[in-house]
Image (cartoon, rainbow, N blue to C red):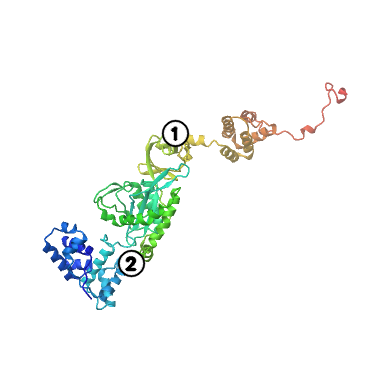
């Protein structure tokens, strides 16, 4: 076969690699031509005595005039190399497993291919293959180890159906280091509430928890960046503790620390943004539905140069290495400080609502931690009160156990409590109290009458009070406290009228006109 002239692009690659100080053999392997051909082009370049910038600036015709006479001898097929290259995708996947090294994989390779490459060449050709398939790859990520998260630079949007306003939204991106399984979600903002919620949705999407989460230095995750000990946002740190993982922020101005997620963002612009932007959406939920539909196609798409997808790799090697999710989801806690009022209540300005604390903490400064459902109040790291959150404005939520004895007594003045106290004395007393409570008088007047009747038990005892109540019921004077008091003071509580007294005949007397007088 006749010798062939290589393309101008390959010539440019040879010269650039040579200018970068690469060896001739490495250039030959990278460009996939013989080492002798590389030597001829380098020799021709040195002979022309032109700076690399000038040579690189020549067009193809001018470059052909300099190097067109050099021919490349076609390389014969190397079946040993072809067999090795076929092993590389499986080798890359196996290296992500815990305890697997290149040495152990080389031993297994030699068992199958006794005449194969020795260890040094085995690693050398694998490195070259990695550079061609994934030029930015510089480290091997362990399975279940890291989840990289970030926001995309470009935004998406939806249109409000009522006003027609176009509302721009942020796009959150997360990717697992080993399997490269990706999660994407549109959120309202980059604030901590939206950021933490998106991170939580990611963990539930992948069905487990990695050993670490790697965010960029955004304020929702990192308050103050530092090379060794960055200061984390308290809410995000609490989120990580809830899910039993840790936070490893990327170093500032070190994009390679999060190269995976940045690469995912670039791919997302093509595979997610382009198809999503072809339609108009009227809500954030509708937009996310379209995003997730295209996301599944992305995760199921075969990786470049491999015979497996992100989803296949995740299910095979990474899912089982993730830690289980906790039973409950994380609730974001916000914190405010408040001074307890004289009435024993602390004010939560977010809801304009008052919550009680034990009365001994009156005038103390307390810390309030609140979530969407609960309100916790602390004094010097001691939790002194817990309430269900109520967003009703200017309303008091009171735990009676927090009140002093005097205030508890006042708080107990309810119809149910009066009936309960009366029943403990006697059923007849309860009957009188029940009728008093049904009266049409003012509530305070009714409460005073009930308190007065029940207080008589201290002076006259339960039996006499019950008797007075029975006698008052007979005469229908039961709605007045003074009537029952009068019965007790005149000792009428034990006197009972004979029920047959009304049946006696009228006595005869001269001053009494008979029934015939009126006829």
Give the mark nearer the N terminus: 2 vs 1. Answer: 2
> Percent position (x, y) of residue 374?
44, 45
Q: Quadrant of the C terminus?
A: top right
Residue 325 visible in the snapshot: no
> Percent position (x, y) of residue 257?
27, 55
Query: 518 or 277, which lies in front?
Result: 277
Q: Classify mark 1: residues with Cα within 10 Å, few (<14), some (14-19) or many (20+).
A: few
Q: Quadrant of residue 73?
A: bottom left
Q: Is there CB contact under 8 Å for labels 2 and 1? A: no
How many numbered circles are shown? 2
Residue 230 visible in the snapshot: yes
Query: 181 or 406, which lies in front?
Result: 181
Q: Classify mark 2: residues with Cα within 10 Å, few (<14), some (14-19) or many (20+).
A: some
> Percent position (x, y) of residue 431?
64, 37
> Percent position (x, y) of residue 92?
30, 67
Residue of label 2: 306
Q: Residue at the location (42% across, 36% down)?
A: 347
Query: 277 or 249, which lies in front?
Result: 277
Residue of label 1: 343
Label 1, secondary structure: give it.
loop
Q: Quadrant of residue 270?
A: bottom left
Q: Is residue 347 left or right of residue 67?
A: right
Label 2, secondary structure: give it.
loop
């Amino acid at each position: 076969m006749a010798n062939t002239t290589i393309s101008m692009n390959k010539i440019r690659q040879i010269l650039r690699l040579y200018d970068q100080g690469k060896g001739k053999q490495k250039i030959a392997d990278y460009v996939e031509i013989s080492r002798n051909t590389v030597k001829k082009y380098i020799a021709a370049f040195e002979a022309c005595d032109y700076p690399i910038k000038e040579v690189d600036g020549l067009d193809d015709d001018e470059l052909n005039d300099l190097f067109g006479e050099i021919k490349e001898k076609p390389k014969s097929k190397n079946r040993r190399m072809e067999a090795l290259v076929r092993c590389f995708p499986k080798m890359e996947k196996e290296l992500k497993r815990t305890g697997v090294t290149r040495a152990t994989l080389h031993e297994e390779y030699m068992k199958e291919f006794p005449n194969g490459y020795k260890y040094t060449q085995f690693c050398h050709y694998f490195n070259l293959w990695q550079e061609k398939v994934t030029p930015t790859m510089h480290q091997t990520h362990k399975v279940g180890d890291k989840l990289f998260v970030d926001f995309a630079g470009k935004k998406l949007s939806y249109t409000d159906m009522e006003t027609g306003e176009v509302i721009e939204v942020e796009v959150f991106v997360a990717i697992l280091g080993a399997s490269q399984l990706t999660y994407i979600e549109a959120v309202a903002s980059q604030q901590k509430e939206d950021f933490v919620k998106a991170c939580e949705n990611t963990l539930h999407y992948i069905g487990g928890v990695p050993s670490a989460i790697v965010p960029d230095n955004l304020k929702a995750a990192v308050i103050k960046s530092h090379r060794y000990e960055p200061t984390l946002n308290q809410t995000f740190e609490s989120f990580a503790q809830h899910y039993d993982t840790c936070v490893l922020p990327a170093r500032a101005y070190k994009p390679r620390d999060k190269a995976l997620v940045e690469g995912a963002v670039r791919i997302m612009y093509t595979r997610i943004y382009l198809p999503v932007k072809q339609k108009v959406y009227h809500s954030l939920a509708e937009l996310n539905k379209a995003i997730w539909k295209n996301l599944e196609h992305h995760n199921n798409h075969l990786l470049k140069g491999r015979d497996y997808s992100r989803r296949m790799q995740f299910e095979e090697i990474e899912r089982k290495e993730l830690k289980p999710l906790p039973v409950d989801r994380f609730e974001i806690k916000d914190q405010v400080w408040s001074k307890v009022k004289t009435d024993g209540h602390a004010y939560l300005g977010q809801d304009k609502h008052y919550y009680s604390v034990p009365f001994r903490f009156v005038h103390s400064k307390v810390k309030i931690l609140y979530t969407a459902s609960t309100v916790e109040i602390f004094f010097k790291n001691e939790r002194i009160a817990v309430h269900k959150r109520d967003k009703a404005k200017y309303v008091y939520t009171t735990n009676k156990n927090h009140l002093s004895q005097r205030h508890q007594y006042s708080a107990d003045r309810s119809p149910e409590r009066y009936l309960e106290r009366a029943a403990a004395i006697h059923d007849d007393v309860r009957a009188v109290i029940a009728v008093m409570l049904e009266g049409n008088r003012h509530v305070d007047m009714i409460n005073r009458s009930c308190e007065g009747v029940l207080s008589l038990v201290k002076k006259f005892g339960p039996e006499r009070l019950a008797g007075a109540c029975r006698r008052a019921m007979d005469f229908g004077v039961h709605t007045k406290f003074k009537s029952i008091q009068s019965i007790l003071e005149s000792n009428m509580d034990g006197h009972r009228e004979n029920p047959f007294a009304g049946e006696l005949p009228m006595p005869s007397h001269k001053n009494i006109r008979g029934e015939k007088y009126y006829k």
